[in-house]
Image: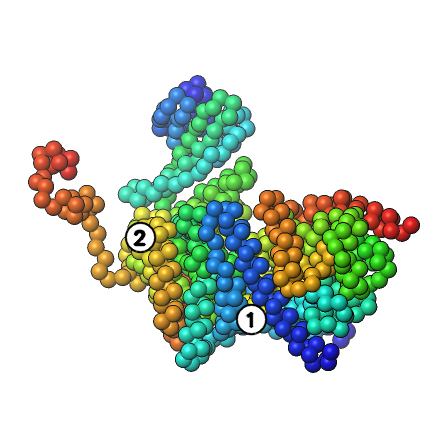
Amino acid sequence: MKDLIEKLTEDFKISDVVYQRPDLAFVTVPKGVAISLVTELRDFEGFSHFVMMSCVDWIEEGKFQLLYLLHNPKTKTDVGVKTFIDRENAEMASAHHLWKQVWTYQRELKEAFGIDFPGSPRVDENFVVEGWTEMPHMRRDFNTKEYSQNTYFPRPGRETNDPAEYMRKKLYPNEPITAKKQDNDK
Amino acid sequence: MTIYAKLGYTLLGLLIVLNWGFLMGATFRKIGARVAGRYGIPFYQPWLNLLKNISTRTTITHGVMYYIGPVFRLTGGIGLFLFMPMVFTGTVDGPWTNFSFEGDLILILYFQVFGMLGMALGAGQGGHPYSAMGIARGLAQHAAVELPLTLAFISIAIQFDTFSVYKIVAAQQGGIENWVLFTNPFAAATIILAMLGAMGHSPFNLVKAPNEILIGPATEFEGTYLGFMQSAGSILHVMEAVLFMNLVFGGASNWIELIVKTFLIYFWSVFVGMVFPRFKIEQSVTWFFKVPLLLGFLAIIIYSF
Amino acid sequence: MSEKDMNDKVNEMLQRSEANVKKAEKSFIHPEDEEREVVAPDGSIIKVNPIYDYFSGEKPKEEKPCSGIIEKFLNWARAESIWVLGFGTGCGSIEIPPLVTPRFDMFRFGVQMRPTPRQSNAFIISGYLSVKTLKRVIRTYEQMPSPKYILALGSCTINGGMYYDSYSTINRLDKYIPVDVYIAGCMPRPEALLAGFTKLKELIKEGKGEKANEYARNFDEYKANQKKIIKDWNMPDYNW
């Protein structure tokens, strides 16, 4: 694992390497070489299985972090390739030519985060929500509670309780709160 | 006997047959429930279902053939009833022989297919995209059932030298040893096996099974049309049982005997259905083309010489 | 008509349909369902509007119940023969299979499952409803023959339950379709469902199972609520 990543470090400008487990490592590369690194891993290093692709919204830094997780069925090792892209006008090179299932992941990311993958087949179609007209719903600045309250006719009189507190009041109203319990509460 | 008395007896007979069909259907559901360890529906559920279906307030239509489908099916059942002698009373002009005449066996063969064809026409206009597939499967299985059944009928017709069901019943009177079951065992065996398909219970109920390509041809039918089809199904079940009773098991000399015999004939198919799981269409078609068809040919060959 | 005229006409049509496709990308309606003109094999031009050609689109009407003892008798039959549509909309549909097993056995109460909306008169909304499912639920509900009843299962249909702040699940079902019986719980056990069926039977026998008429009476209000959240309304307004 270490040898492999050290071998690739120079060519692909790998910066931030995390060895999570003996068989799992994450590397961070610039946006431009991410797809090349994924291709290299697939074609020459035996990482032929595409596990998944996901996205993290780093709203404070104004970035999206994309993750391509690959698996090598022979050595039973995984490598996650991370890359940062801009949050404004988010766009990433498409990897649809490497695996067909990438189509669906990119379609999902387009819908949920609004990241465009030019050239990816069917990327503009609906994935989960139909007829969505607001901002992409998985972005962190989308206020889902406010949207729900404005849209879905909330029923008045709804109360929210802390389950532990509520059960103690309901079931054991006379029992004094012991020191141990207070510790637990903290 | 005047024609009015005859008509009265026929209508009364139809009423008895309809209710007996409903009761048999409920008993079938009840037996299924007991086999599964459940309590099951109340015995009066089919009447309630009919009432509920008739009392739906909105109905949709897909055109004239859509209406005619259930009517054809009901006509098939009633037609089968009209030309079938129910109870043997010693004379063809008697009270419960309906409009039986020379050659009614051939007419009955036609009426058996009539309902299925009506369903095909109605479902074809129903707008359900898979109804054509359901109908094709139904007709394929029906043809496979009819072939051995018809061979057995012809064998019995050759044996007694008549196409009249009434005369076939009359020839079997005078003791259990005169029944076709013992005088023509190959034809009887063919009918007993092919009967399973004609009754349409498991293992041969893929055609009308719910959830197999939805419900098959009946998907679009609702309300009164569905009530029609359920009534027709009940009448058809009883009439098939009466037909086999008349041909193989010596007919009936009173209503009690008819009810006992049709119950046993019907529940032969029900109990087989409780034990065996559902066949695919290609499996059921090949099943009918093996043993029943062979027995049918044997029955014909033996009585041809 | 000469061959050249015919070709010109076909080209014109093609251009127009391309324009339609471009327009449809914004309007959520599939280009095949757009209102447009087509050239028949004999050269004549036909206007088609697939959404309204295939469905009636007519508004539902209030159906007056029969009077007095007849309606009572029919209501008794309806109450004792409830045919439930086999359509599980959420997690609660897992509570329905136990009902047909020996332990709970809903058949003894006259409750049976049907696989098609045309033949069923009760609809169990089993748990949370996403907007995507609500669209299918409305279409299915409108296909059922009147009188029809709705049992709403679980707290999600009452006030949103644990998904009250979700962007894709509705909070109150009765804003979109009329509900006869609410069964509270998360999830209600099969016994609660049986109790709900018993309650529904009581309501029907008392002549209170007229929610289909209520839907017809307040049709515009319900439609407005439905259209507020179903943004890609690409079906007729009423489609039985």
Q: How many marks?
A: 2
Q: Which mark is residue C185?
A: 2
Q: In the image, is C80 to the left or to the right of B213?
A: left
Residue that numbered label 1 is attached to: B224
The chain identifier of the residue carrying mark 2 reads C
A11 or B65, nearer to the observer: B65
Quadrant of the rendered structure where residue A22 is? top left
Q: Residue furthest front?
A: B174
For label 2, count other residues whose C-alpha is less than 10 Å away and answer few (under 14), some (14-19) or many (20+): some
Q: Is residue C18 above or below residue A95?
A: below
Task: Please state which amino acid type lies under the numbered disc 2.
Answer: Gly
- Residue ID at (64%, 64%): B255
Which image quarter is the N terminus of chain A in?
top left
Q: Nearer the viewer, mark 2 or mark 1?
A: 1
Q: Is residue B46 above or below residue B55?
A: above
SS for dot 1? helix
- Residue ID at (76%, 44%): B290
SS for dot 2? loop
* Pointers 2 and 1 within a single chain: no
Instruction: Provide residue A140's location: percent of width, then percent of height.
Output: 31, 47
- Residue ID at (76%, 70%): B91
- Residue ID at (43%, 28%): A79
The chain identifier of the residue carrying mark 1 reads B
Instruction: Provide residue C204's location: percent of width, then percent of height.
Output: 39, 69
Q: In the image, is B82 to the left or to the right of C165?
A: right
Instruction: Provide residue B145's location: percent of width, then percent of height.
Output: 73, 53
Q: In the image, is C226 to the left or to the right of A176?
A: right
Q: State how far apart marks 2 and 1 are (Cα).
A: 37 Å
Instruction: Provide residue B219's location: percent of width, then percent of height.
Output: 58, 61
Residue A173 shows up from this direction: yes
